[in-house]
Amino acid sequence: MSDNADIVVIGAGMAGAAAAYHLAVRRGVRRVVLIDEREPLTLTSDKGTQAYRNWWPGPDATMLRYMTRSIDLLEEMADESENVFRMNRRGYVFVTGDEEGVERLRGTAREVSSFGMGELREHGGEASGYRPAPAEGYVGAVIGADLLSADAARRVFPGLGRDVRAALHVRRAGWFNALALGAWLLKRALGAGATFVRDRVTAIDQAGGRVTGVRLASGARFGTDRVAIAAGPALPEAARMLDLELPVFLELHAKLTMRDTQGVVARSMPFLIWNDPVTLPWTAAERSALEPDPDSGRLFAPFPGGVHVRPVDGPYGDELYIIWTYDIAPHAFAWPPQFDRHYGEIAIRGSSRMLPAMSAYFGTGGGFVDGGYYCKTRENRPLVGPLPIEGAFVLGALSGYGIMGSHAGADLLAAHLTGARLPDYARWFLPSRYEEAGYRAEIDRWGENVGQL
């Protein structure tokens, strides 16, 4: 069977759904075909913390501008849908127990403020002038960031430890229901004439150096002269159908969902992130029990900072998400992924450095661990735009920010595909940027994982 499409989008995660929406709804492309072997939004789009932020430290304003555009689009869609995906503006709160960490927070906040995040405000013990974030919604909420002293931080965010030195509350940030957003995007795209096909793409046909169609495992074929790969962690495999090796790698990231039956984290709390390195708390008896385990050595070694905690509206009404990126080694794609068997216990004990009452859950093993893969470039910027094969495009390498960043990426991809005017930051996301020796030298200077929390 053969049919034709104006544009084929490979992958129906958040990036693919956003691409279909921007092409069919906002750009008026008539025959958009979205193809995935899975049901939409079931590979990695539902595996993260479903949060967003306009906090992106250097090396320059590029990613902050990109993410600001994405948040603008999210708010437009929330307005249009009457906030069906429950976008809030509770914010991200970075917490430190280190005096040098306070200066790092202040210095980084000033830098990101200069990029366009908004004003940095500082508050002492009584938190005078500080405006709490609303639990729901985003309209009229403040922007910028608030740096709270130790006493002010504990007053505003009950449960933080006595050794906390400061907390930085980034305000144009929060979370939403990613599955509800994805479903809305798909509904709007399908209503505008797009088609979803559940099948596996097995080949991208070429002739004369340009795309001519895609072939599917079922034997079907779609003739097309434009293909957009938005395949998430399957991006490297999809690119190989064009004989391309893209400069990306995969990291495996886990998330713990647990019940907070003791009410350690208030349901109105923002997204909390502990910035400092952590040595997990173990009793002498626990250490003795663990030491025969050949993997136990790493449980006693220092872990990097970055443990994240936020409340989530689950079936019991008392759930938390805890995510901690302590292992960033590249992984080969495999599904279902296999996670560290100690992850739940590590996440809980790590979070107790910020929230001491989490010690009530020591030894419980946590709750349910799931997760997925970050597909990343070395400098942690996405790939958006044309590939070396004429008619082939990419929206990928969205790392751990696909839920929040897909929308600016899909908007940019749609502009490329339809010949519309491009924003001036578009060049910094082109796959061809790596052909510039100067850019490669800049990446060496920046270091890896820029912007990863």
Image (cartoon, grey):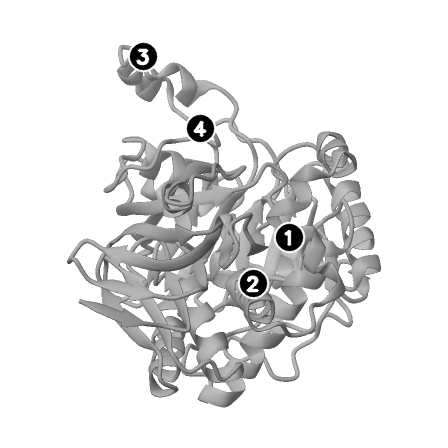
Q: The disc labelled 2 sits on which kind of residue?
A: Gly
Q: Secondary structure at mark 4?
A: loop
User: Would you say 396 lies left or right of 148 here?
Assistant: left
Question: Label 1: few (<14), some or many (≥20) within 10 Å?
Answer: many
Q: Earlier in the sequence, mark 2 or mark 1?
A: 2
Q: Earlier in the sequence, mark 2 or mark 4?
A: 4
Q: In front: mark 4 or mark 1?
A: 1
User: Would you say 26 lies left or right of 55 here?
Assistant: left
Q: In front: mark 4 or mark 3?
A: 3
Mark drawn on residue 409 = 2
Q: Which residue occupies the foreground of this view, 409 or 269?
A: 409
Q: Residue visible at 57% across and 72% down? A: 89
Q: Is residue 327 in view?
A: yes
Residue under numbered circle 1:
429
Q: Earlier in the sequence, mark 4 or mark 3?
A: 4
Residue 253 image-quadrant placement: top left
The residues bearing labels 4 and 3 have C-alpha atoms spaced at a distance of 14 Å
Q: Earlier in the sequence, mark 3 or mark 1?
A: 3
Q: Earlier in the sequence, mark 4 or mark 1?
A: 4
Q: Are marks 2 and 1 in contact (CB under 8 Å)?
A: yes
The residues bearing labels 3 and 1 have C-alpha atoms spaced at a distance of 47 Å
Q: Secondary structure at mark 1?
A: helix
Q: Are marks 4 and 1 in contact (CB under 8 Å)?
A: no
The residues bearing labels 4 and 1 have C-alpha atoms spaced at a distance of 42 Å
Q: The disc labelled 3 sits on which kind of residue?
A: Glu
Q: Secondary structure at mark 3?
A: loop
Q: Residue visible at 61% across and 41% down? A: 275
Q: The disc labelled 4 sits on which kind of residue?
A: Pro
Residue under numbered circle 3:
291
Q: Which residue occupies the foreground of this view, 326 or 225?
A: 225
Residue under numbered circle 4:
281
Question: Label 4: few (<14), some or many (≥20) within 10 Å?
Answer: some
